[in-house]
Image: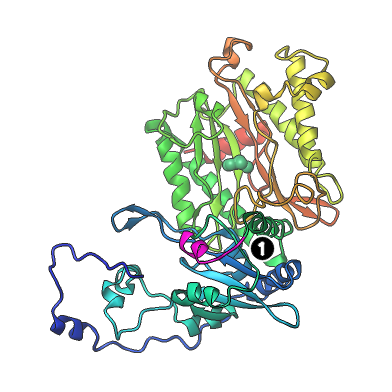
Amino acid sequence: MAKARKNGLYSGISAELSALMKTGWADTERHELPLDEQAPYAARRRAALSALFPGERLVIPSGNLKARSNDDTYPFRPYSGYVHMTGDQARDGALVLEPRPEGGHDAYCYVLPRDGRDTDEFWLGYHAELWMGRRRSLAESERVLGLSCRDVRAVADDLRADSAVPTRIVRGVDAALEAAVTSDEERDEELEEALSGLRLVKDAWEIGEMRKAVDSTVRGFTDCVGELSRAVASSERWVEGTFFRRARLEGNSVGYGSICAAGDHATIMHWTDNDGPVRPGDLLLLDAGVESRTLYTADVTRTLPVSGTFTAVQRTVYDAVYEAQEAGMAAVKPGAAYRDFHVAAQRYLAEKLVEWGFIEGPADRAYELGLQRRFTMAGTGHMLGLDVHDCAEARNEEYVDGVLEPGMVLTVEPGLYFQPDDLTVPEEWRGIGVRIEDDLLVTADGHENLSAGLPRSSDEVEAWMARVAG
Ligand code: GLY
Ligand code: MN
Ligand code: MN
């Protein structure tokens, strides 16, 4: 806050200019702002967190802007635990749950309120509204969030003033706030674990947001197929830009760096340079997700034959991945072990790889030894939500060693990747990468494929491309 905005070519501010700037502004306080529809859900999430940590103060920061150079910054994305517990997206904020003597907690959302017009801060400060855009007043934030709000410039002093209260803070989000708190690293990690675990089962409002993110993603994929010839004429970047346009138009952004991988780039799990050619005859692996305005993300992959039809080898690989995904999805139902879908898909792929002679059988032995991993590389899926790899800090007992429950949302995304320099497979297989990824909601009696709007089997994909590809 002490940091001042640099004046560039200007040198100094006259008293007359300072006085002029402070006068003649309308009162823009918004008295009619409605309560955010997420507020009652966030209140229930806070109650669940409160019950896990009786008598303790909990500090959950939102994070700060990161400078790119000078006063240019990277796009801000708040810490997901803060978003989940408040419904807020402010930067430099923090949720503080203060334990009440009689049990439970009082919640305070510390945020940076809008600048008054009585100091130079609103036009010269580091966070100057005239440069950064209007923020909410504390009263406005209270109306929207349904939470008591306080000025974040007081948070460090408030926390220090009563430092006898046992305190936990989520580390790695706001260094300055962390420095103001005395806490124990292991106990802090338990807070992060709890926040992550509380996101495993999505509430009804969150499921609605996931549907929006996936529906926008389906439209984004359709855009990319519709503009495939533009990608062939330029590069993978056309695909990235096409999807990004949809993501910014309908959502906040992409939920992770889009993977637009044509040709043998498809064998690179995290290919995000997206600067290669898109050639007819090759496959294009597109792994992308729109992040909703409320910061929930989809995570979908389709692998497309650029020319519109698969070659025989491409189809063989594609159909094996499709069958593995079918086997994985069949295992997604309440009460099933979380790992079941992964085991089902990996077993199927191990069998195919033995059948093709690429790994030594029998298939059970190959699976037990994990030999298929040379070609399947990654796990078969993960939880999805505010983060693409949502709930990643949750305890193993709750997540990877846990059981599926209605309201969980996860990806099922088997793949096969034959590296271009892999001498253990025939030459025509080298450089082929296929992944099919869908987003599944666990329901009371099975699952719903939220991304079913996109064609998936090889025949459906070809028919889709014949219809839509431009
Ligand atoms: N796009 C990242 C993943 O599929 O996990
Ligand atoms: Mn994924
Ligand atoms: Mn993905």
The residue at the far front in this view is 164
Crowd class of label 1 (few under 14; some 14 to 19; many from 20; radius 10 Å): many
Q: Nearer the viewer, residue 43 or 36?
A: 43
Please identify the quarter of the rendering in which residue 107 is found: bottom right
Q: Which residues are magenta?
A: 175-183
The quadrant of the rendering that contains the N terminus is: bottom left
Please identify the quarter of the rendering in which residue 462 is found: top right
Q: Is residue 449 magenta?
A: no
**Residue 7, above or below 380:** below
Image quadrant, ligand 2: top right
Q: Nearer the viewer, residue 172 or 74?
A: 172
Q: Is residue 461 left or right of residue 271?
A: right
Residue for badge 1: 206
- Under 8 Å from ligand 2: the CB of mark 1? no
Q: Position of residue 219 (x, y in %)?
A: 55, 50
Q: Position of residue 95 (x, y in %)?
A: 57, 71
Q: Nearer the viewer, residue 467 or 153?
A: 153
Q: Is residue 200 left or right of residue 283?
A: right
Count of number-bearing discs = 1
Q: Position of residue 298 (x, y in %)?
A: 60, 51
Residue lying at 28% horizontally and 55% vertically, measured from the top left = 70
Residue lying at 48% horizontally and 88% vertically, measured from the top left = 31
